[in-house]
Amino acid sequence: MDNKTIATYNRLAQGYDDETADFWEKFPRTFLDQFVSLSGTTILDVGSGPGRDGLLLQEAGKEVMCLDASEEMVKLSSERGLPSVVGDFMGLPFPDAAFDGVWAYTSLLHVPKAVVGSAFEEVVRVLKDGGMLGLGFIGGGQELYRENLGEGNPRWFSYYMKEEVERLVERQGCEPVYFESFPAGKSGSKDYLNFIFRKVMKSDQS
């Protein structure tokens, strides 16, 4: 995540938390529930923000580790009792095959497409063979800074087509197991694209 986007999240952490707290009440929970059902116990929440999804995963019986590039976001998730660290998507501070599942909901869309392959490589690296990767993106093709949290608060967004995400993740040795989409807001807005991939076991690749 670039410094401008991190600075915006640091400035607006509490407001963002307030604004998004009821996300999974406004939008279908089927994707989150599918991930809970398919994944094992230990989960890394990459780009965890204030811990909204981490808490839901914890309540579902998962052992959750939160990671975010924003120090202020990490403070909020820590205050909720979630183990949390400040970290970079491009170099996760965990050993290989450390987690049964990785949850990265609308976080990797803040990585430019030119380097997002390295972020995918990292999230797959820390997954155990057979582990589940939950990803959320927003449909489209543009890359740009947006100030939809207020003027002077830019965040980088990379929008994706479904097939584009599938190609990127399959290159890392994963196979798709679930997909759904739903409108991100009012009529005519972009769609959320939600994916679950399974890291293919080495024995399956031989």
Image (spheres, rainbow, N blue to C red):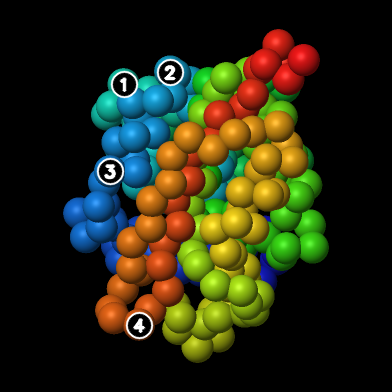
The x, y position of residue 137, in whole percent, is: 51, 58
Q: Check if mark 1's residue and mark 2's residue have beta carbons within 8 Å.
A: yes
Which SS class for mark 3?
helix
Q: Where is 195 relative to 83, above or below?
A: below
- Residue bearing the label numbered 3: 30
Is 202 displayed left or right of 175 in the figure?
Answer: right
| Distance from the alpha carbon under mark 1 to that under mark 2 | 7 Å
Q: Check if mark 4's residue and mark 1's residue have beta carbons within 8 Å.
A: no
The x, y position of residue 181, in whole percent, is: 38, 57
- Residue bearing the label numbered 1: 61
- Residue bearing the label numbered 4: 188
Residue 30 visible in the current orientation: yes
Residue 72 visible in the current orientation: no
Furthest residue toward bottom: 151
Q: Which residue is depicted at the point 60% across and 56% down? A: 163
| Distance from the alpha carbon under mark 2 to that under mark 4 | 38 Å
Between residue 13 and residue 63, name the one nearer to us: 63
Q: Which residue is depicted at the point 62% across and 27% down? A: 199
| Distance from the alpha carbon under mark 1 to that under mark 3 | 17 Å
Furthest residue toward left: 25
Q: Give the foreground label among 2 and 4.
A: 4
| Distance from the alpha carbon under mark 3 to that under mark 2 | 19 Å
Query: Around disc 3, counting alpha carbons within 10 Å, would you say few (fewer than 14), some (14 to 19), or many (20 or more)?
Result: few
Amino acid carrying mark 2 in the image: Thr
- Which of the two labelled residues, at mark 4 and mark 1, occupies the earlier sequence position? 1
Furthest residue toward top: 203
- Residue bearing the label numbered 2: 41
